[in-house]
Amino acid sequence: MIAMKPTPEARPAVLDVEASGFGRDSYPIEVGYALPDGRVFCTLIRPEPQWTHWDPQAERLHQIPRPALLNRGRSAVEVATLLNEQLQGRTVYSDGWNHDYTWLALLYDAAGQRQRFKLENLRALLQEDEAERWHAIKQQIADERGPQRHRASADARLLQLTLQRVRQGATLPS
């Protein structure tokens, strides 16, 4: 008898983090998520005084200038509190788990709080055939949605929609 892993809900909670770069000194600048009911949330994060690394290539990708973070970003304490309130007790999935995990740990450390939700790798939800179709289906959905800002909540929603379509057995036209 072959044991099947339990199937989580069709649209799990998905989280994405934008950052100042990818280096060792990078830090989170925006976090967003998409919930199973379709609601999305996104907020900018004001850099802590010791968070000074800034990668111009990352800025070109996410199009969030550092002055916008300083003027409109929320404090690490406020963002950590909001995430804990909205995601407490959930398992939340990320396609960039290794980076997002590190950036969330930095956020919660700066806030002096404990993260109250579990972050898991989105890949764990995919069977092998689904993983093989993932990138093509993701691109198909991105094309259907048209130009979107490269922002955390939009990215989280794209990942959630991709997972849903992949699970429905979608294939690409030949």
Image: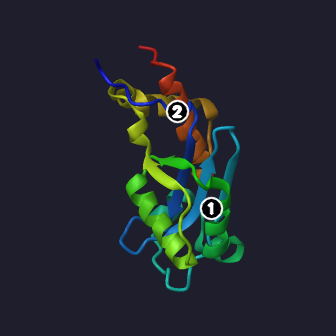
Amino acid residing under circle 2:
Thr
Q: Which residue is mark 1?
A: 84
Which of 3 and 73 lies nearest the eye of the viewer? 3
Check the image and name the residue furthest to the front. 1
Check the image and name the residue furthest to the bottom. 49
Left or right of 165 in this view: 73:
right
Q: Position of residue 171 (x, y in %)?
A: 45, 18
Q: Position of residue 160 (x, y in %)?
A: 56, 38
Q: Position of residue 131 (x, y in %)?
A: 37, 31
Amino acid residing under circle 1:
Asn
As measured in the structure, the alpha-carbon distance from the residue carrying label 2 to the one carrying label 1 is 25 Å
Q: Which residue is mark 2?
A: 162
Which is more N-terminal, label 1 or label 2?
1
Q: Locate the C terminus and report the quarter of the image it occupies.
A: top left
Which of 42 and 120 lies nearest the eye of the viewer? 120
- Residue 29 occupies quadrant: bottom right
Answer whether labels 2 and 1 touch (C-beta < 8 Å). no
Location of residue 77 with respect to 135 vertically, above or below: below
State the SS at label 2. Answer: helix
For label 1, count other residues whose C-alpha is less than 10 Å away and answer few (under 14), some (14-19) or many (20+): some
The answer to whether residue 120 is seen in the rendering is yes
Q: Position of residue 172 (x, y in %)?
A: 45, 19
Left or right of 23 in this view: 66:
right
